[in-house]
Image: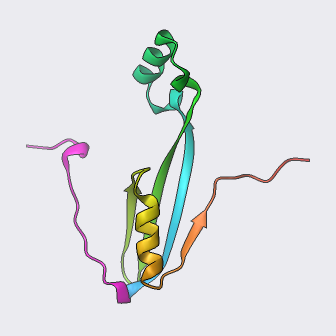
């Protein structure tokens, strides 16, 4: 029986010695972009959350023959970055900031 994508899990192990690079990136989305149902409910309820922006954090780990992309939670991404930095890895920040147009 086929499973929905949300129900599948994938497990992979990367050795620290094989890691070549680590990149942290994030995107800021307005609450309205987080889902039509959430946007409609928040707008009708008059909540200020409708206009707030939420961040989504991602960590990409590139090894010699493999890679992993992890979606990090907003409350633990700093801890995970610090763990890699403690182990001697440089975590490169990828920002969505665009240069100002003049």
Q: Is residue 85 magenta-colored?
A: no
Q: Quadrant of residue 84?
A: bottom left
Give the residue at x 73% y 52%: 98
**Magenta range:** 1-17
Give the residue at x 46% y 71%: 82
Up-down: is 92 above or below 57?
Answer: below
Characterize the magenta stretch by its predominant secondary structure: loop
Where is residue 13 shown, x and y percent of the image? 25, 75
- Foreground residue among 28 and 67: 28
Q: Is residue 12 magenta-colored?
A: yes
Where is residue 18 shown, x and y percent of the image? 37, 87
Up-down: is 50 above or below 54?
Answer: above
Give the residue at x 23% y 61%: 10
Q: Quadrant of residue 48?
A: top right
Q: Name the outermost residue toward the bottom.
A: 17
Left or right of residue 51: residue 98? right
């Amino acid at each position: 029986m086929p499973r929905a994508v949300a129900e599948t899990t994938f497990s992979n192990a990367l050795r620290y010695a094989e890691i070549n690079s680590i990149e942290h990136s994030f995107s800021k989305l307005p609450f309205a972009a987080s889902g039509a149902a959430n946007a409609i409910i928040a707008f009708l309820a008059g909540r200020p959350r409708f206009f707030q922006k939420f961040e989504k954090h991602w960590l990409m780990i590139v090894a010699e023959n493999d890679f992993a992309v992890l979606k990090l939670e907003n409350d633990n991404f700093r801890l995970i970055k610090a763990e890699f930095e403690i182990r001697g890895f440089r975590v490169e920040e990828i920002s969505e900031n665009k240069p100002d147009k003049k």
